[in-house]
Amino acid sequence: MLPTREIHSSLRRVSVFDGLTDPEIDAFSGFFRERRIDANCVLFREGDRGDSLFVVLQGSFTVDLLGPNGESLCIGHLGPGDVIGELACLDNTPRSATLIATSKALALELTWTEFERMSRDLPRVASLLLGVILQELTDRLRAIDRRIESELGRGSTPLPAPLYVAPPVQISMWQRLAARFRGDE
């Protein structure tokens, strides 16, 4: 197990946690457990029961989906600083993708049980984490909407321009939410 100080410094380097104070990071880090994943090993599979999220500290992963004929389709890559598996942590549904380590990796896992405990013990931190997850999901949905519009717009009549196009993100979601809680916005 990583020493608490090392977990603290690892979380401090993850941009989504920029809005936390040092005492909050110290308290927050106690809710995680370390997961070491060897190269070419599966962290979780599409369809597996899920009840936790992970913060990648080292290494990289591919995100794969099953294709219509059962083939594996790589849809993305994740690495240090990425938060993964948040959907299953929120609603305890089956995993929506398979994650495979492409190198030796280190991640911190937050289970739903520990998240519930965090909600009682550190409600501000848990609230900020939920806000980050919701913002991430919103960003993903907007990206999917743009991709669908682009795909449908090819060929025949182009679709009208979207009413709202999100500006490029300059600061992390965590930083924005932390600023809101501090009253900076």
Image: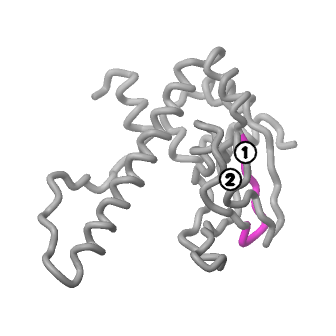
Q: Which of the 4 image quadrants contains residue 69?
A: bottom right
Rendered position, 148 above or below 182: below
Residue 103 screen position, x and y as percent: 75, 70
Q: Which residue is mark 1?
A: 108
Rendered position, 141 above or below 118: below
Q: Which of the 4 image quadrants contains residue 131?
A: top left
Secondary element at tag 2: strand
Rendered position, 61 above or below 140: below
Report how far apart the C-alphas of labels 2 and 1 lie in the structure.
Answer: 7 Å
User: Which secondary structure type mostly characterizes the magenta part of the structure?
Assistant: strand
Q: What span is colored magenta in the figure? A: 101-109
**Residue at (69% x, 32% y) in the render:** 112
Secondary element at tag 1: strand
10 Å crowding of disc 2: few (<14), some (14-19), many (20+): many
Asked whether the residues under the numbered discs 2 and 1 touch, taking CB atoms below 8 Å apart as contact, a structural biologist would say yes
Rendered position, 64 above or below 172: below
Tally the marks: 2
10 Å crowding of disc 1: few (<14), some (14-19), many (20+): many
- Relative depth, front residue between 129 and 69: 69
Q: Which residue is mark 2?
A: 57
Q: In the picture provided, is 14 more to the left or to the right than 164?
A: right
Q: Amino acid at mark 2?
A: Leu
Q: In the picture provided, is 170 more to the left or to the right than 77?
A: left
Residue 111 screen position, x and y as percent: 72, 36
